[in-house]
Amino acid sequence: MRLPPRLPVLRMLPLVAALLVPAPITAAVAQGAAPRHAIIPAPNRIEFARSGTFTITDSTPVFIAADADDDTERVGRQLATMLGPGATRAARRLPEAVRAPAGAIRLVRDERFEDAGAEGYVLDVRTDGVTIRAREAAGLFYGVQTLRQLLPWSIEHRAALARRLVLPVGEVVDVPRFAWRGAMLDVARHFLPPADVKRYLDVMALYKLNMLHLHLADDQGWRLEILSRPNLTRHGASTQVGGGAGGFYTQAEYRDLVAYAAARHIMIVPEIDMPGHTNAALASYPELTCDGVAPPLYTGIRVGFSAMCPSKESTYKFVEDVVLELAELTPGPYLHLGGDEVEKLTRAEYLGFIERVEKIVRAQGKNMIGWGEIAPANLDPSTIVQHWRSDARASRDSAHLHAERGGSVIMSPGNRTYLDMKYDSTTVLGLRWAGLISVQHAYSWEPSTFLPRVPADKVIGVEAPLWAETLEKRADYEYLAFPRLIAIAELGWSRANVRGWDGFRARLGEHGPRLQALGVNFYRSPEIPWK
Ligand code: TNX
């Protein structure tokens, strides 16, 4: 690998070695020693000097390169705004060859920083200044999140006066383990307004999650405006579980969500579930049913009863119309087409439907994602299978069929990652079909070996779905998601050699005041020594 010779930090600490050798301090934390930091996800490598600090004041400047691009400028602005009081602040531009004045924070993009990938970074804190280096803006953004977590939780109270923002001198060298570090929100069973989705994105970003999968349509509601099919939202969005008013995102609102996520280096993956989980669509467009009769809207929580008619051309015309608009709304490469829990079709009908839908998605230049059930179809290797069944049924899972043809798998095993499962028998919200999931249970498993027949190199990451049958409002969603989503975030980012339950729970305990400052309604699990 090539190292920029002018970086003393990297000469002292070659990146390759840094990634391969477990860091002594993090390892100590993993073994349960008192944490010297509370960074989640645990970085690959972190070293603190014996002494020394860097103090941020209201006048600490943030510098970016004179010719920095828009993405870098945005990270600079996010950092400057986070550190300073009051209004949004911009970063200042400085030619790379010019030394920053003492007391500054500098963000440096370095093309030669190859091994760090798009998301890796080095954070160097010295008494006279701070530097974050990365190849891409995403890496700088994650370096900023680490800096944020090294600062006391008072950083999260932007309006507070005279915050004492002191950083320990040290160095972090960090690269994510998995490319796919996801969360899923079910906005179909109960609609979640855009502002609440943004709040979820805010917390995801703090923990370096990079994919938000939105489950936009199910039996109980259709939540995305499709201009060519207006009845989907006029009628299909008009209710939700329990019979409430429902709701949907206009295309303008949806684009705004996509941009909001992108500014936090999160990609939105839209899901329109089919051929099952489609009652809201069938109720809106009766040509999707085999008998041509529109069913009534549905507000219960049963699954498996609805299906689009696989033998009618009008079904595929509908899918094309929806996929066309979905693709236009989606800058990222992925469209999720569901495919789960279909009880009303024969196996041949189901597999034929999935194969045809995959072609429709590929014709729009996108990669399809589907739930585990799609794996037996004759799929293209560019398609991604999302495993969701839990242990008991995992042995019968077919994700390996897709891995064998070279396809990738996202790990969302129900008994580990389903945030809608209850924490314990006293949890009021949530379901329990995949078991009770304590924070420790959500944390203590290994994504790359979970499915014995799927090789590690086919596992592209983890995702924690939050199904919303029992969740009505933001506080409900947050209660089930946090802190378990934070555990999944660490599985997605941190290598196995820097992970460990004792270290994690100690660090997580330190996040209590931070989450509280952010207004997150997290569950104060008795497993965690909350501060
Ligand atoms: C299974 S996971 C489902 C969802 C439910 C969820 C409840 C999956 C692909 N399907 O339709 O909401 O269980 O936990």
Image (tube, grey):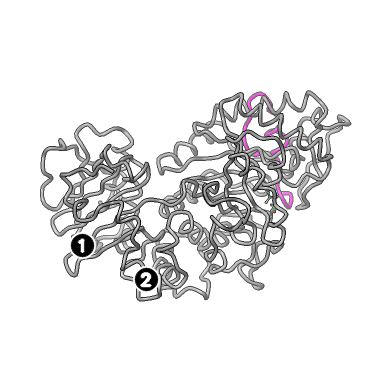
Residue 231 shown in magenta: yes
Vertical order, 229 against 14 (above or below): above
Along the viewing direction, whichever of 208 and 3 lies nearer the viewer: 3
In the picture provided, is 112 more to the left or to the right than 343? Answer: left
Instruction: From the top left corner, tell me how far across and down residue 419 is, in percent.
Output: 59, 59
Mark 1 → mark 2, Cα distance in angstroms: 18 Å
Q: What element carries label 2?
A: helix
Disc 2 marks a residue whose amino acid type is: Val
Residue segment shown in magenta: 223-243
Q: Which label was assigned to residue 169?
A: 1
Residue closer to the observer: 400 or 218: 400
Q: Dot 1 lies on which element?
A: strand
Look at the image and say whether residue 352 sits in the magenta stretch.
no
Precedes in sequence: disc 1 or disc 2: 2
**Where's residue 442, x and y in %?**
56, 64
- The residue shown at (68%, 45%) is 245
Q: Is residue 46 above or below residue 531?
A: above
Q: Which residue is under mark 2?
A: 29
State the image coordinates of residue 350 (x, y, percent, origin top left): 78, 37
Residue at (45, 70) in percent of width and height: 505
Q: Which of 514 and 438 is in front in this view?
A: 438
75 displayed left or right of 250: left
Residue 441 against residue 133 in the figure, above or below: below
Please indicate whether residue 165 sits to the left or right of residue 258 in the image.
left
